[in-house]
Image (spheres, rainbow, N blue to C red):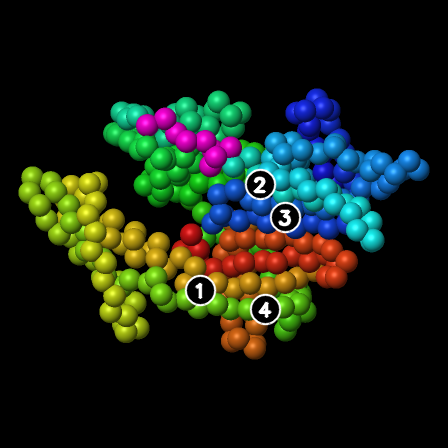
């Protein structure tokens, strides 16, 4: 692993080629990916730490592996410490999308604006390049940015309304697009198949607390109405949990039912999630699908990769922790 650090205080670029520990997580369900790096701070013959004072919050970080860039980020915290085992520097940070999370958006209303134009207005001043699926890049009649919205909140909300997801690529590009649920499996994970990546540790989590099988949406067109939607699959499984809400975008029954269905789908998100550990040498990316077979938990099928965590330390060596969810319920 190779890290290039840009110091805004020292106006210099530094290279880190050796790290004693690192923990880097890329996730589609978390806006800003996280990184943690620990490097040695050797002491010279006069007792001074050779890397002391070099790294500071707000430094930029480009983290790369042999197959390409993993993350472009910004440091949040820098801790320097020593004990009887030596002296070290620990750096914590997030990817570039944290700039949009940490800046409040100007409250105002936009009219008749394409999503791509809106994203460029908000994210362009920070140097972001954006890639929006042109098929779904529609003109939005009215965009209201509320007090308290972050820059990320307002563009993510409008992206979801057009049926897409928003994320930041490792090179810092903002992407608004459909997720790759229908793609062919890129990976095979199993301990029972010879041509699969071997699993070192496996867990499957089922959660039901947030699930609703029925949603009513109260809207107002020419007159007030209530649109109702019930998920047949959840209902057949015995769920009896209703949500009633109001939505200003529900101008007719059809739109109200669409909104109700979306709320049910969003509450399924994360209700089934698998997490397993593999050898860190394997390249695995989010927004891909994978075939998984595990006899112990009776799991077999194609699932969506939501997150990849890359870890290395003296205790575990180099490992990757993969998170997956069912297709179409991943995010």
- Element class at badge 1: strand
Q: Residue at x 24, y 69 (%)?
A: 240
Residue that protrudes farthest toward the left in the picture: 223
Residue 247 location, quadrant: top left
- Magenta stretch, main secondary structure class: loop
Question: Where residue 202 is drawn, which disc sits there?
Answer: 4
Is tag 3's residue or tag 1's residue first in the polypeptide sequence?
3
User: In the rendered view of the protein, which quadrant contains the N terminus?
Assistant: top right
Q: Are marks 2 and 4 in contact (CB under 8 Å)?
A: no
Residue 108 visible in the current orientation: yes
Q: Position of residue 205 (x, y in %)?
A: 48, 67
Q: CA distance from mark 3 to mark 1?
A: 23 Å
Is tag 4's residue or tag 3's residue first in the polypeptide sequence?
3
- Disc number lying in front (4 or 3): 3
Question: Where residue 24 is drawn, which disc sits there?
Answer: 3
Is tag 2's residue or tag 4's residue first in the polypeptide sequence?
2
Q: CA distance from mark 3 to mark 2?
A: 9 Å
Q: In the rendered view, does 294 fall on the left or right side of 220?
A: right
Is tag 2's residue or tag 1's residue first in the polypeptide sequence?
2
Q: Are marks 2 and 1 in contact (CB under 8 Å)?
A: no
Is tag 3's residue or tag 2's residue first in the polypeptide sequence?
3
- Residue bearing the label numbered 1: 272
Q: Could you classify mark 4 by the number of other residues whose Cα lies within 10 Å: few (under 14), some (14-19), or many (20 or more)?
A: some
- Element class at badge 2: strand
Q: CA distance from mark 2 to mark 1?
A: 27 Å
Q: Residue at x 36, y 35 (%)?
A: 148
In magenta, the rendered stretch is 99-107
- Residue bearing the label numbered 2: 94
Q: Could you classify mark 2 by the number of other residues whose Cα lies within 10 Å: few (under 14), some (14-19), or many (20 or more)?
A: many
- Disc number lying in front (2 or 4): 2
């Amino acid at each position: 692993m190779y890290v290039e650090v840009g110091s805004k205080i020292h106006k210099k670029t530094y290279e880190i080629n050796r790290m004693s520990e690192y923990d880097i997580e890329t996730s589609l369900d978390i806006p800003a990916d996280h990184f943690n790096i620990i490097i040695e701070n050797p002491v010279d013959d006069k007792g001074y730490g050779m890397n002391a004072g070099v790294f500071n919050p707000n430094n930029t970080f480009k983290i790369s592996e042999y197959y390409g860039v993993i993350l472009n980020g910004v440091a949040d915290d820098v801790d320097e410490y020593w004990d009887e085992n030596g002296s070290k520097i620990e750096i914590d940070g997030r990817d570039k999308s944290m700039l949009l999370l940490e800046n409040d958006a100007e409250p105002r209303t936009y009219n008749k604006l394409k999503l791509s134009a809106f994203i460029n207005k908000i994210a362009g001043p920070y140097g972001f390049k954006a890639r929006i699926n042109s098929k779904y890049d529609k003109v939005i009649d009215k965009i209201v940015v509320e007090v308290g919205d972050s820059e990320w909140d307002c563009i993510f909300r409008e992206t979801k309304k057009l049926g897409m997801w928003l994320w930041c690529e490792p090179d810092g590009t903002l992407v608004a697009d459909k997720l790759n649920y229908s793609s062919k499996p890129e990976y095979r994970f199993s301990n029972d198949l010879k041509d699969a990546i071997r699993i070192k540790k496996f867990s499957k989590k089922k959660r039901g607390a947030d699930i609703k099988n029925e949603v009513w949406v109260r809207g107002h067109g020419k007159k007030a109405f209530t649109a109702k939607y019930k998920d047949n699959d959840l209902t057949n499984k015995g769920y009896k949990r209703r949500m009633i809400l109001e939505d200003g975008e529900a101008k007719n029954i059809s739109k109200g039912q669409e909104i109700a269905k979306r709320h049910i789908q969003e509450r399924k998100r994360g209700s089934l999630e698998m997490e397993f550990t593999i050898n860190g040498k394997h390249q695995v990316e989010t927004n891909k699908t994978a075939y998984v077979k595990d006899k112990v938990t009776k799991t077999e099928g194609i699932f969506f990769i939501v997150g990849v965590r890359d870890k290395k330390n003296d205790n575990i060596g180099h490992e990757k922790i993969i998170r997956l969810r069912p297709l179409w319920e991943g995010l």
